[in-house]
Amino acid sequence: MLLAICKKLTIVARWGAKAKTDDLEERYPSILSSILERQKLSCLTSTTIATLTMETISKTTTGKGEILDLATLMKASRTLSQDISLEGAIANLMQVVMENAGAENVALMLLQDQVLMLTAFATEDRISQLEAIPAETSHSIPLSIINQVKHNKKPLVIYNANHETAYAGDIYIQEHQPQSVLCLPLLDRGQMIGILYLENNQVTGAFTSDRVEFLNLLCSQAAISLENARLYQKSQNYAQQLEQTQLQLVQSEKMASIGQLVSGVAHEINNPIDFISGNLDCATEYIQNLIDLLQLYQQGCDWNSKTTQDKIEEIELDDLIEDLPEMIESMRQGTNRITEISKSMRTFSRSDTIAKVPFNIHQGIDSTLLILKHRLKANEHRPEIEVVKNSENLPEINCYPGQLNQVFMNILANAIDALEEASEGKNYADIEANNNRITISTKLSTDKNMAVVEIADNGSGMSEKVRSQIFEQGFTTKGVGKGTGLYQIR
C-alpha cells in the first residue's frame, strides 16, 4: 500500500499536477507526512554551485506536494558527471531533466563561436541530438523568450504563456500555445555556455519555485560537465586534425623532407593534451570528494559533527574549493595552446590552388618556426638557437602559400643543420658566449614591388664552390637519405 501510494505521488508530482498531489496528501496524511518531511530539501539554495538571480513572470506556486529528494539530486549529479564525451554529457543532461523537471518538451542550445545553436530536443517519447542549427532559424522554440534569457542571463518562469502579452507576437507561442514555460541559462563562472528551454502543455504553473531551484543546481553542475566535455572534444579534434595534417605532409611529394619533423610537432601538442588529461583525473577525484561529503548530509550528519569535520579535513575542502576552478582554467589554456598549434599547422600545410592567392608572409614564417621549435630548443650539446626577427609591416602578397612555406622550411632547416655542424667539437660555454643565431628580416624592395625575405645564420658559412652549386638539381652536402638539396625550392 505504502509503495503504491509513493509511486503514484511521484508520477503525478513529476507532471506538475499539484491538485492531484494535494489530494493524495489530504487522503493519506499519516502515511505521507513523515516521508515528505524526511525528503524535503530545506537547504537547497545554500548548496547551489552558483547563486542565480531569478526573474519570475506572472505567478508561481509552491505546494507541499513538491518533493525535492536528496537521493534524486545525488543520482542526477552522478549521471551528469559520468561521461566525458560531449555527446554523452548532452544525452545525460536531457535524460536527467526529462526525469525530474515535469516537462513535456525540452530543448538544449549551446553557444558555438558566440552563436546559439539548437543542439538537442527531448519529448516524452525520445531524446534526439540534432545536427546543430542556429537557434534563430529554428521553428521549434519561442525566440522571444530565448533571446530575453540570452540577454539577461537570468532564469525565466512563465505561469501560463498563453496569457502573457509580452510574448503574444511570438510565432511559436501562437502556433503551439504552451502553458507552463521555464527557460534557464547554463552558466560556467558567470559566462553563458547555453540555454535550457522547458515547457508543459498540460498544466499551468508546472515549474514551481522549488523545482526551479532544483533545476538551478543541476544546471550549475551541467554547465561544468558540458564545458569540460567540450574542452576535451576540442583537444581530441585538434589532435586528430594534427595527425591527419602530419600524414598529408609526409605523403606529399613536395613535403617529403618534413617527415623527420613530425615527432617534434607531436611533442608540442602532446604536452597540453597530457596536462588536460591529468587535470581531468584530479577534477574527477575532487568532484567525487564533494559527492562523498554530500552523502554524509544524506545520512543525517551535521556540519559540526566529528564525522563531517573529519571528512572535510580528509578531502582538504578549502584547498579543493580553491584548486578546482584553477584546474578548469588551466585546461582551457591548454586547449587554447592546442588551437594555436593547430592553426599554425593549417597555415603551413595549406594546399595550393591553380591561381596565386593573397598570403601573409609573416604567418608562413611563424608557422614554420613553430614546426621547427623542437629543433631550436637547447640540448645537452648546445644552448637554444636564438631566432631574431626584423620585420616590417608587409601587405599580403599573391603567391602559392604551400610552396612558399616549403621554401621557408628548407632554408630554416638547413640553417639549423649548419649551426649544429658548427657547434661540433666546441664546449657548451664557448657556444653560449657566441650563441647560435638565425636572423630573419622582411622588407619591401626599394621600388615597393616585391617583398624581400632574408634568412641568415652565424654558423661557419659555405665555400664559394658550394655557393655556386647550391641550387643545382641533386646537389646536397648531406649524406645519402638526409636531404634533397635546395633545388626544389627555386
Image (cartoon, rainbow, N blue to C red):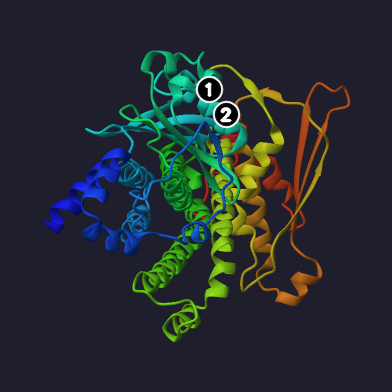
**Is 423 drawn above or below residue 137 in the view shown?**
below
The foreground one among 244 and 147 is 147
Examine the rendering and report whether any part of residue 87 can be seen.
yes
Percent x, y of residue 374: 58, 58
Percent x, y of residue 116: 51, 30
**Location of mark 2 (residue):** 148
In the image, what residue occupies the spot 57% across and 33% down?
A: 150
Identify the secondary structure beneath mark 1: helix
**Location of mark 1 (residue):** 144
Mark 2 near mark 1, Cβ–Cβ under 8 Å? Answer: yes
Q: Residue furthest left?
A: 1
Examine the rendering and report whether any part of residue 239 can be seen.
no
**Is 476 drawn above or below residue 297 in the view shown?**
above
* Image quarter of the N terminus: bottom left
Percent x, y of residue 81: 38, 56
The three-letter amino acid code for the residue at tag 1 is Ser
Quadrant assignment, res 12: top left
